Amino acid sequence: MGMFSKELLELDRNTVQYMIDEMQEEIDRAKEEMIQKDEQLFQKENQLIQKNEQLEESNRLYRDALKRIEELEKKLS
């Protein structure tokens, strides 16, 4: 009976270690997925920043053009 109990104890230990290893692999996969999603978000944020900068530049050019038109209209009046 003692031998059987030792074998069962070893099997239980192996089962616990296997479950721990499986959970660690799952955690590692989740971490990797989070890292990838974080990188995607970072890239999207940079794209939005670039588009915002382009819009600001376009707005500045538009305002400058309107100002020049107003100045020309004043000169023509």
Image: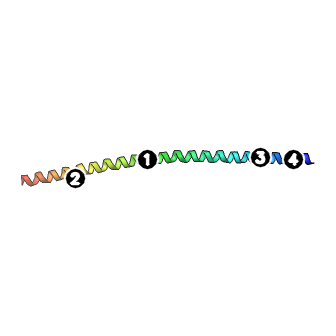
- 33 vs 63, left or right, is right
Callout 1 secondary element: helix
Amino acid type, label 4: Lys
**Looking at this view, is 38 or 51 the one in front?**
38
Q: Earlier in the sequence, mark 3 or mark 1?
A: 3
- The residue pinned by badge 3 equals 15
Spatial CA distance of label 1 from label 2 is 28 Å
Amino acid type, label 1: Lys
Measuring 48% from the left and 45% from the top, which residue is drawn there? Answer: 40
Locate the C terminus and report the quarter of the image it occupies. bottom left
Mark in the foreground, 1 or 4: 4
The answer to which image quadrant residue 28 occupies is: top right
- The residue pinned by badge 4 equals 6
Measuring 40% from the left and 47% from the top, which residue is drawn there? Answer: 46
* Residue 33 horizontal/vertical position (percent): 56, 45
Q: Is there a contact, CB below 8 Å, between mark 4 and mark 3?
A: no
The mark total stands at: 4
Q: Earlier in the sequence, mark 2 or mark 4?
A: 4
Q: Which mark is residue 44?
A: 1
- The residue pinned by badge 2 equals 63
Spatial CA distance of label 2 from label 3 is 71 Å
